[in-house]
Image (spheres, grey):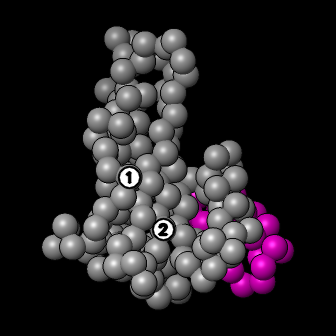
Amino acid sequence: MRFENQVAIVTGAGRGIGQAISLRLANEGARVACVSRTEVNAKNIANQINAIRADTGRAYTVDVADHAAVHKIGAQILEDFGRADILINNAGVTRDVLAMRMSLEDWDSVVNTNLRGAFSFAQAFIRADKLCGEQSGFGRSYQITRSRAGEPQYHRKRRSAGIHHDRHDRRAFR
């Protein structure tokens, strides 16, 4: 198994792409911290993972736009798992309107969830010096973005511009 005994954190794990990623990582041997905005979704995916391999999935509920709450959940994940080898920043929202019609509140929601949330999770583990593989000396951090082809919606491109690295050497963040 490719990810045997590695710890993966997946935001937006409760449904869609995040759920599929969580299940795949579990099938490949990872222990998975399932992060979702809703407790029901987080528990559902953790239960599915635990049906695959007992005691390898745990549910965490947090609004990724809340920086302080993300750091608190990050500390809980580290307490529960001891480390983090893989961080999948998948949580995201869209507001399906053209940028010229988008309200400032909707813009803030998109940016705070999609960009700030990814930053907050990465920072929580990098600051704790716990986003690292034991053998490799570095962890893996992936940012998932979404878009609909042909739609000129500027806010859908925000994460690609704001976070551009897929993999980092933890020493670069000291």
Determine which residue is flagged by label 2.
Answer: 86
Q: Is residue 147 left or right of residue 119?
A: right
Residue 43 magenta: yes
| Viewer-closest of 129 and 134 | 134
Indicate the position of residue 37 as horizontal and vertical percent values. Answer: 56, 55
Point out the stretch of residues depicted in magenta.
Answer: 34-57
Q: Is residue 151 left or right of residue 68?
A: right
| Viewer-closest of 144 and 94 | 144
Q: Residue at x 49, y 45 (%)?
A: 144
Q: Is residue 128 above or below residue 121?
A: below
Q: Bin the neighbour count of mark 2 within 10 Å (Cα to Cα): few under 14, some 14-19, many 20 and up.
A: many
Image quadrant occupied by the C terminus = bottom left
Say whether residue 24 is visible. Answer: yes
Q: Residue at x 48, y 68 (%)?
A: 86
Indicate the position of residue 54 as horizontal and vertical percent values. Answer: 78, 83
Q: Is residue 159 above or below residue 8?
A: above
Label 2 vs 1, first from the N-terminus: 2
Q: Residue at x 31, y 45 (%)?
A: 163
Instruction: Say which quarter of the image contains residue 46.
Output: bottom right
Say whether residue 72 is visible. Answer: no
Q: Which mark is residue 125?
A: none
Question: Given the image, on which type of amino acid does mark 2 rest?
Answer: Ile
